[in-house]
């Protein structure tokens, strides 16, 4: 009889295998047989852990969303700092992770696919995971410019920050094609970090 640890490993394998397939082919083009084969397990194991392909897809989307979240414990520590310092730490850490992570990971590919054509699973995960992250960033930025986290200029600045991360890291090939050398220039002496911090503070601080 397998142990709980073995069961957890099988579940994790199924999520990883499904994530890769869903990211590459989309939900409709992938069968439970494909997923079980990719995970090296039986369809019965998939049914045991998830009951359906739809249920598995929800778990896969959540796994992709959770991958880059600022944890509750990290948020608590950041709230102890002055808002400007906390905001700069978040930007610095995000840039560090973006420069080292694999942009071709199934998590990134799946979220990119979902961003273009969102499923109900993604909309639900966004409400539970991404919106609280945006709320937290708006809280920090609002503290810097002395505005409410619900202020539209603050929300616009935070949303623009997410877009800048995507532009300069997820689509860095486009940046290099249109502006050769810009990525290297921004990587020197934390220029990108400085620029982004100043940009979002300026945007949020508008009257």
Image: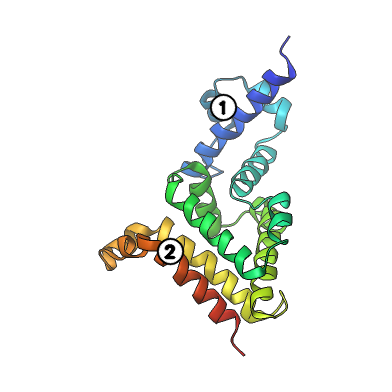
In space, the residues marked 1 and 2 are separated at their CA atoms by: 36 Å
Q: Quadrant of residue 182?
A: bottom left
Q: Residue at x 48, y 70 (%)?
A: 196
Question: Pointer 1: what residue?
Answer: 33
User: Residue 156: image x %, image y %?
Assistant: 59, 76
At 48% from the left and 56% from the top, the residue drawn is 95
| Other-residue count near label 1 (Cα within 10 Å), few / some / many at <14 / 14–19 / ≥20 | few
Q: Residue furthest bottom?
A: 207
Quarter occupied by the C terminus: bottom right
Q: Between 103 and 57, which is closer to the camera in this rendering?
A: 103
The residue at the point 59 percent across, 57 percent down is 118
First reached walking from the N terminus: tag 1 or tag 2: 1
From this view, report whether residue 192 is shown above or below residue 93: below
Instruction: Classify mark 2: residues with Cα within 10 Å, few (<14), some (14-19) or many (20+).
Output: some
Viewed as shown, does residue 105 lie left or right of 83?
A: left
Q: Are marks 1 and 2 in contact (CB under 8 Å)?
A: no
In terms of secondary structure, where does tag 2 sit? helix
Q: Which residue is mark 2?
A: 167
Residue 103 visible? The answer is no
Residue 157: x %, y % from top left: 57, 75
Q: Which numbered tag is attached to residue 70?
A: none
């Amino acid at each position: 009889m397998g142990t709980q640890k073995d069961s957890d490993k099988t579940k994790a394998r199924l999520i990883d295998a499904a994530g890769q397939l869903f990211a590459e082919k989309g939900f409709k083009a992938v069968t439970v047989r494909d997923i079980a084969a990719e995970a090296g397990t039986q369809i019965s194991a998939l049914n045991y852990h998830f009951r359906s392909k739809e249920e598995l897809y929800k778990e896969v989307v959540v796994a992709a969303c959770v991958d880059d979240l600022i944890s509750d414990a990290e948020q608590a520590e950041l709230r102890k700092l002055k808002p400007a310092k906390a905001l700069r730490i978040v930007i610095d850490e995000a840039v560090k992770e973006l420069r080292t992570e694999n942009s071709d990971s199934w998590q990134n590919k799946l979220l990119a696919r979902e961003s273009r054509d969102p499923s109900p699973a993604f909309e639900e995960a966004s409400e539970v995971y991404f919106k609280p992250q945006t709320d937290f960033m708006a809280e920090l930025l609002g503290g810097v410019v002395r505005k409410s986290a619900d202020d539209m200029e603050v929300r616009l600045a935070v949303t623009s920050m997410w877009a800048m991360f995507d532009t300069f890291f997820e689509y860095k090939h486009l940046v290099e094609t249109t502006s050769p050398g810009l990525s290297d220039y921004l990587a020197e002496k934390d220029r990108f970090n400085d620029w982004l911090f100043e940009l979002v503070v300026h945007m949020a601080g508008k009257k």
